[in-house]
Amino acid sequence: MRHPGDIWTFVGPRGPVDVPVSGRLKTDNGLLRRSAARAGAGVFLAPDFLVAEDLQRGALVAMLQEYIPTPGSLDVVYPAHRASSPKVRGLVAFLSTRLAEGVS
């Protein structure tokens, strides 16, 4: 059975490309993946904000910079009775706007 993280999709110089990936460590926790990469466990795909400091100080090295990962998605989950909450609506509006602008 394939999982969403088993294939990385990029847009490169020649168009879209799917890269099948595998490894001994599978997690959706970006901090854990970053720690494993710092320890030499391999490569990982991460948003800029998660690795900016590591790249700057040389703890991690960027690869395949001419390939841009396709946008992911973000699911906002909340109890149905909170859907009309101004705080929930405000957060969803804020995230929708920021992500549509491409801000990480």
Image (tube, helix red, strand yellow):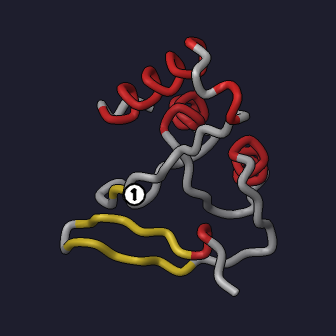
Image-based side of 80 in relation to 21, left or right: right
Residue 47 on image: x %, y %? 51, 42
- Left or right: 1 with respect to 96? right
Question: Could you tell me which residue is drawn at 76 percent across and 66 percent down?
Answer: 26
Give the x, y percent position of residue 13.
Answer: 20, 67
x 49%, y 69%: residue = 8
Q: Amino acid at mark 1?
A: Pro
18 up-or-down from 104: above or below: below
Q: Quadrant of the N terminus?
A: bottom right
Nearest the eye: 10 or 82: 82
Residue located farthest toward the top when viewing the structure as drawn: 86
Q: Nearer the viewer, residue 89 or 53?
A: 89
Looking at the picture, how far across and down is residue 82, in whole percent? 67, 25
Circle 1 SS class: strand
Measuring 74% from the left and 41% from the top, which residue is drawn there?
A: 31
Question: Looking at the picture, does residue 82 appear above or below residue 64?
Answer: above
Snapshot quadrant of residue 104: top left
Q: Nearer the viewer, residue 56 or 69?
A: 69
Q: How many marks overall? A: 1
Which residue is at a point 33% across and 60% down the rendered structure image? 67
**Label 1 neighbour load within 10 Å: few <14, some 14-19, many 20+:** some
Whole-percent x, y for residue 36 in the image: 77, 53
Q: Camera-side residue: 42 or 11? A: 11
In which image quadrant can residue 53 be found? top right
Q: Which residue is mark 1?
A: 69
